[in-house]
Image: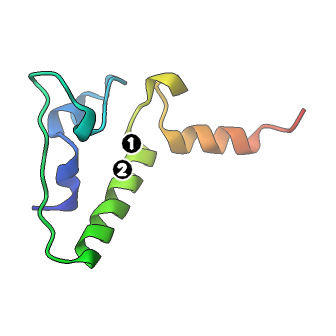
């Protein structure tokens, strides 16, 4: 099973902005995907993959349905007042 299995495929395809981390998912149509790791290196790689997916692809409602990486880039380009 790949590290990408941390994200439910149905939610990933829909990108409705109501995407929640799997551990906080509560609806009956949401699934918790579990990945078993054999050592610390596997866990570290899975966490890096999750972080990259979250920052680049998840649409966050409180950020105006934008990905965190997009908000960071926009903020970095905005001149200080």
Look at the picture and state if 2 lies above or below 34.
Answer: below
The residue at which mark 1 appears reads as 57
Residue 76 pos. (x, y %): 72, 45
Callout 1 touching callout 2 (CB < 8 Å)? yes
Residue 4 pos. (x, y %): 22, 54
- Residue that sits furthest to the right in the current view: 81
Please tell me whether mark 1 sits on a helix, a strand or a loop: helix
Look at the picture and state if 52 lies above or below 62.
Answer: below
**Mark 1 neighbour class, 10 Å CA radius: few under 14, some 14 to 19, many 20 or more:** some
Number of the label disc, if any, that sits on residue 36:
none
Pick the quarter of the image with the N terminus.
bottom left
Pick the quarter of the image with the C terminus.
top right
From the viewer's perspective, tell me whether residue 25 is left or right of residue 51.
left
Residue 69 pos. (x, y %): 53, 45
The residue at which mark 2 appears reads as 53
Please tell me whether mark 2 sits on a helix, a strand or a loop: helix
Q: Residue drawn at (16%, 40%), measured in percent from left and top?
A: 9
From the viewer's perspective, tell me whether residue 30 is left or right of residue 45.
left
Front residue of 59 and 51: 51
Front residue of 57 and 8: 8
Residue 29 pos. (x, y %): 10, 24
Q: Quadrant of residue 30?
A: top left
């Amino acid at each position: 099973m790949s590290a990408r299995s941390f994200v439910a495929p149905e939610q990933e395809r829909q990108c409705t902005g109501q995407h929640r981390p799997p551990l906080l998912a509560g609806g009956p149509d949401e699934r918790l995907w579990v990945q078993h790791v054999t050592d610390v290196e596997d866990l570290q790689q899975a966490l890096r993959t999750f972080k990259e997916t979250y920052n680049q692809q998840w649409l966050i409602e409180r950020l105006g349905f934008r990905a965190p990486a997009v908000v960071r880039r926009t903020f970095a380009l905005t001149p200080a007042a």
